[in-house]
Image (spheres, grey):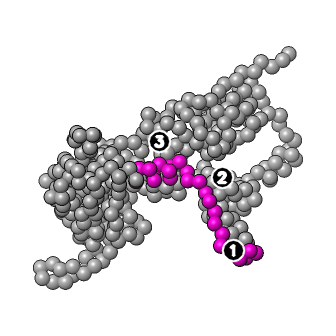
């Protein structure tokens, strides 16, 4: 009796209205392979995130319609699964040989990097746990090839690599911000000793109660919300000839990842505790590294915070994340000599920067806004007691 084929389509997920198309980064299966329900079939990159597309049903991948690197749109069919088919089981010896020939496991971000750099994963030896291939293994292979070519030819080597979709989008938004907003930056310095003392005093009890470490980021988010509440114009945005005042506080937190800069949104930050903010940031950071942030988490926001201090930055002028009207830049906290009551003392100082859209925010409001952030950090009890 002939087997009746039961074919289902594998479709691109519904993308948000702001995302018109995406790119297939890397298929994890080839035609004829068995697939299990829920197993990731392919990585799909938009200008904001890398999405994993799981199999809706178990079966055999009967056909791949769209291959690696091709552009796709919402709900477009990209493959077919035969849910009634099965793959013939190989003898044990063949299975072992096949397993030996398969490349070591790697994360989606590392697989994507190897694909972009045209590195044959099967030729790599993984240095990670259980032989997993890491980013360093991929880059090391490129360096070996480059060194070998340089040694044999003595020429100055160049390599042309296409921008990823997310890097293209970052470039577009930065240019959009600089071209469409009148950006100015104001600076101030803050003594971080009160926050450091508060953190040192309660960090152990905080972690024991909430199960998350007490960092510094939550204090900056709370300080930003405190200042935004005092100066609503900084939380507003421009829409044509209108000013849109936002009655909520959705704070974007810039996170650097292997794929580029992403800014996930802490929504209703004014309603969250320090512990809840720390959990959100820790979760965002972890999922940014693996490309698991969703489009919704990267959309919107009324104000952003960029912390170049984690990379050692002393001072910078952050670029506004449109359509927002301002962004806070945080830098490295360093011990510096300052004058207090006529005496030179050493304090852990941090230089803060606020870039703002001068079309709607005057210098007066921008300076006072940054002073409010400074006050909230130097007198953290004021924020915690809602004074």
Sequence-wise, which precedes: disc 2 or disc 3? 2
Question: Can residue 121 be seen in the rendering of this structure?
Answer: yes
Question: Can residue 273 be seen in the rendering of this structure?
Answer: no
Give me the C-alpha separation between circle 1 and circle 3: 44 Å
**Residue 383 shown in magenta:** no
Sequence-wise, which precedes: disc 1 or disc 3? 1
Nearer mark to the viewer, of 1 and 3: 1
Q: Residues within 10 Å of mark 1 (few under 14, many from 20)?
A: few
Assign a secondary structure to mark 2.
helix
Which region is colored magenta?
A: 151-174
Assign a secondary structure to mark 3.
loop
Residue 182 pos. (x, y %): 27, 54
Give me the C-alpha separation between circle 2 and circle 3: 22 Å
In the image, what residue occupies the spot 87% across and 47% down?
A: 93
Sequence-wise, which precedes: disc 2 or disc 1? 2
In the image, what residue occupies the spot 35% across and 54% down?
A: 178
Front one among 341 and 95 = 341
Q: Is residue 6 above or below residue 347?
A: above
- Left or right: where does residue 255 sit relative to residue 387? right
Residue 300 numbered tag: none
Residue 155 numbered tag: 1
Residue 131 pos. (x, y %): 69, 59
């Amino acid at each position: 009796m002939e087997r009746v084929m039961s074919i289902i389509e594998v479709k691109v997920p519904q993308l948000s209205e702001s995302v018109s198309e995406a790119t297939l980064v890397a298929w994890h299966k080839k035609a004829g392979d068995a697939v299990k329900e829920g197993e990731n079939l392919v990585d799909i990159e938009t200008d904001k995130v890398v999405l994993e597309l799981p199999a809706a049903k178990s079966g055999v991948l009967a056909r791949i319609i769209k291959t690696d690197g091709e552009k796709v749109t919402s709900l477009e069919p990209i493959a077919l699964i035969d849910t009634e088919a099965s793959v013939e089981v190989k003898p044990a010896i063949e299975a072992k040989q096949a397993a030996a020939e398969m490349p070591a496991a790697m994360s989606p971000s590392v697989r994507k990097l190897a694909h972009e750099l045209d590195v044959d994963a099967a030729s790599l030896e993984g240095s990670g746990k259980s032989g997993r291939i890491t980013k360093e293994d991929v880059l090391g292979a490129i360096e070996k090839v480059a060194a070998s070519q340089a040694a044999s030819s003595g020429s100055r080597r160049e390599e042309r690599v296409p921008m990823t979709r997310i890097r293209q989008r970052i470039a577009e938004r930065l240019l959009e911000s600089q071209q469409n907003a009148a950006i100015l930056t104001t600076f101030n310095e803050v003594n971080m000793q009160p926050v450091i003392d508060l953190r040192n005093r309660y960090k152990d009890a905080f972690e024991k109660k909430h199960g998350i470490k007490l960092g510094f980021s939550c204090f900056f988010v709370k300080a930003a919300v405190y200042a935004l509440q005092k100066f609503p114009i900084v939380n507003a945005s421009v829409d044509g000839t209108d000013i849109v005042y936002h009655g909520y506080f959705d704070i974007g937190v810039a996170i650097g990842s292997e794929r580029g800069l992403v800014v996930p949104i802490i929504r209703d930050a004014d309603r969250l505790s320090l512990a809840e903010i720390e959990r959100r940031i820790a979760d965002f950071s972890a999922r940014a590294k693996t490309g698991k942030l969703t489009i919704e988490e990267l959309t919107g926001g009324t104000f952003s915070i960029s912390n170049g201090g984690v990379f050692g930055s002393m001072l910078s002028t952050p670029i506004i994340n449109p359509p927002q009207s301002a962004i806070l830049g945080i830098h490295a906290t360093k011990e510096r000599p300052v004058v207090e009551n006529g005496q030179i003392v050493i304090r852990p100082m941090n230089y803060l920067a606020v870039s703002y859209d001068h079309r709607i925010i005057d210098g007066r409001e921008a300076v006072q806004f940054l002073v409010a952030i400074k006050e909230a950090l130097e007198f953290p009890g004021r924020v915690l007691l809602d004074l």
